[in-house]
Amino acid sequence: AGGSGRLYSEEDPLVILGSSNLKPTVTNSSSAWLVQFYSSWCGHCIQYSSTWKALAQDVKGTGPHCPVRARSVVPLGANRFCVPPGADREVRSVRQLMINILQNHSRTDRPQSCPPLEPYSEKPLRFFFSSLLRSLPGVQRRSSSEAAQTGALQDGRTSEPWRDFDRSQVYTADLESALHYLLRVELAVHGTLDGAELKVFKDFVTLVAKVTAESRTSIRLEVDLLGLLYPVGGSVVKLMETLSDWLLSLPLQQIPYQAILDLVDNKMKISGVFLGAELRWVGCQGSRPGLRGYPCSLWMLFHVLTVQHDATPTALDGSGLEGEAAPVLQVMRRYIRTFFGCKECGRHFEQAAAASMDQVTTQEDEVLWLWNQHNRVNTRLAGSLSDDPVSPKAPWPSPALCPACHEESNGVHVWSHANVLAFLRRHYGASNLNPRYSL
Ligand code: FAD
């Protein structure tokens, strides 16, 4: 079994594959490979990693048992295909699935040296895997040094020094890192953007560019009065504006991802506009690799956008998005549905959007809808493997952050929506963006 990133270590009985070693390792291999493709920050993948490790433990030592050609590689993507979601994703079910695939494979175009598996199908599953395969000729154990050589893919969350931060502030470094990850990693799996996909991406870039630029102007007036520096990383705003202009100026129905990357990486640098070349999590730091990071920063980015759109309702005029009842939420919904790497999260979000997003009609509603939806996700995920003990998932804002947000009615906790709205406007407002750690 293999994959990339930080959910697995060399101690686990599996091979860690990255972009550099995936093909050379599995292509023309004499073994059948089960390859799990995952995102190390995705809660479902984190949750599923224990099943995958248990499965690897279960079949370890069986080694190459059935020579297969490259096209016979068996990809069992935990979230992508083959393994159905829900209770069925137990080790037992995945093992059964493996058996079925191997059996079908051997029936159709089994290489000559691959032993027939059919007669053993009645045997108990555990026995099938651990005993039968171990007894086959030519069985070798993959050495752990070989596994180590294949190396782990960096997911940008190396053991960096801890950055002190204040939970009552929002750090521009997190927002920049969200865009960095989104443009350089999340989008990269789409070789070419076309049709509806391209429209979703254009709308997203337009939204970020328009809303942040407009709020920058209004805030600059305000802070100029106070004699303070404008806090938002100007080059990122400029980058999104340039990207937006460029996308709108192209009458193309298709844009290769490489052209977008080229613009972000090279053309803009010439004019002094650039996006940080690394991920720098601050308020989204995890206490260990694999926790928090990108999904945290994406929530924050959209909270900032709902609040700043509320502060500058005319920001989207002329963008083509102004006709939508809840433009920020609708753009977010389409982005999550089309591009967000955690497909399971996307399905949940889509369900929530389909249930109630059409009731959102004002900018205030947008701010509160997203806050409420985020809290529902927090409640659902509290105590899960993606819950970072240093930043536990809980109804937010806590009484410590916003005492006035919490009230009691007949002995039951209730939110004061008016105070929550006021708090969110302050918290995600432009004047609460802290540029520390920003480029
Ligand atoms: P996050 O929940 O990411 O929160 C980030 C920060 O936002 C917090 O530190 C806090 O400062 C602030 N915040 C917290 N709550 C609120 C609120 N209610 N309103 C405003 N600000 C708040 N993971 C899954 O496993 N299953 C899912 O179905 C799933 N769905 C997702 C849907 C979306 C749209 C996104 C962006 C992510 C989703 N995730 C899901 C990921 C998950 O919600 C977390 O983002 C991830 O586990 C990292 O959590 P975190 O502890 O960093 O805090």
Image: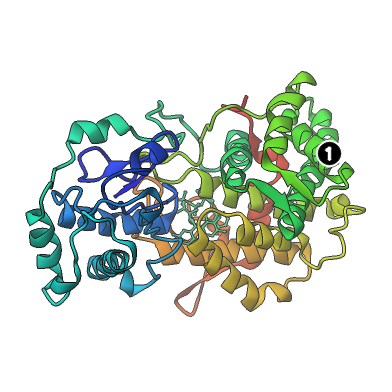
Looking at the picture, how far across and down is residue 305, in whole percent?
Answer: 71, 50
Location of residue 74 by image quarter: bottom left
Q: Is residue 292 left or right of residue 238?
A: left
Q: Quadrant of the C terminus?
A: top right
Q: Is residue 304 visible?
A: yes
Q: Is residue 231 visible?
A: no
Looking at the picture, how far across and down is residue 83, in whole percent?
Answer: 37, 67
Looking at the picture, how far across and down is residue 314, in whole percent?
Answer: 88, 53
Three-letter residue code for mark 1 = Trp
Residue pictured at 82% horizontal, 66% vertical = 324
**Residue sitting at the far right:** 318
Please tell me whether residue 35 is drawn above or below residue 420 in the rendered image: above
Residue pictured at 83% horizontal, 38% vertical = 246
**Residue sitting at the far bottom:** 410
The front one of 169 and 186 is: 186
Q: Is residue 204 left or right of residue 385?
A: right
- Callout 1 secondary element: helix
**What residue would you read off at disc 1?**
246
Looking at the picture, how far across and down is residue 271, in whole percent?
Answer: 80, 21
For label 1, count other residues whose C-alpha is less than 10 Å away and answer few (under 14), some (14-19) or many (20+).
Answer: few
Please tell me whether residue 255 is drawn above or below residue 278 in the rendered image: below
